[in-house]
Amino acid sequence: MINILNIVAQDYDAGLESGMLDPDKYLPKYINAFKDAGVDKIIQEKQNQLDAWIASGKK
């Protein structure tokens, strides 16, 4: 998770949020950087936990 936060904070966030970086050019790089850092594994684990919670019937 730390790698993902570093990507967001250091490489792309400020430039994309402020409009300093061209989103057509940098958004694909941004997404790929997240994927390289393992964001898909994090999303899958969160989904697994949510599915387990729903299946348990607890609210």
Image (spheres, helix red, strand yellow):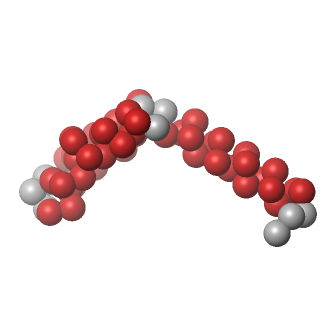
Above or below, 21 relative to 44: below
Q: In the image, is 3 to the left or to the right of 12?
A: right
Q: Residue furthest top?
A: 36
Up-down: is 50 above or below 48? below
**Point 38% across, 33% down: residue:** 3
Q: Given the current orientation, which residue lies at the most extreme bottom position?
A: 59
Q: Is residue 45 visible?
A: yes
Does residue 8 appear to the left or right of 24 in the view shown? Answer: right
Image location (x, y in percent) of residue 33: 34, 36
The percent position of residue 9, horizontal first and vertical second, equals 26, 46
Observer-nearest residue: 14 or 28? 14
Residue found at x 86% / y 64%: 58
What is the total number of numbered labels drawn onto the structure image? 0
Q: Residue at x 65, y 41 (%)?
A: 45
* Occupied quadrant, residue 36: top left
Residue in view at x 73 percent, y 55 percent: 50
Residue 35 visible in the snapshot: no
Which image quarter holds the C terminus?
bottom right
The percent coordinates of residue 16 (x first, y second) are 20, 56
Left/right placement of residue 13 relative to residue 42 reads left
In x, y percent, where is residue 32? 36, 37
Q: Judge by depth and name the residue closer to the eye, 27 or 44.
A: 44
Report the residue that reaches farthest toward the left.
Answer: 20
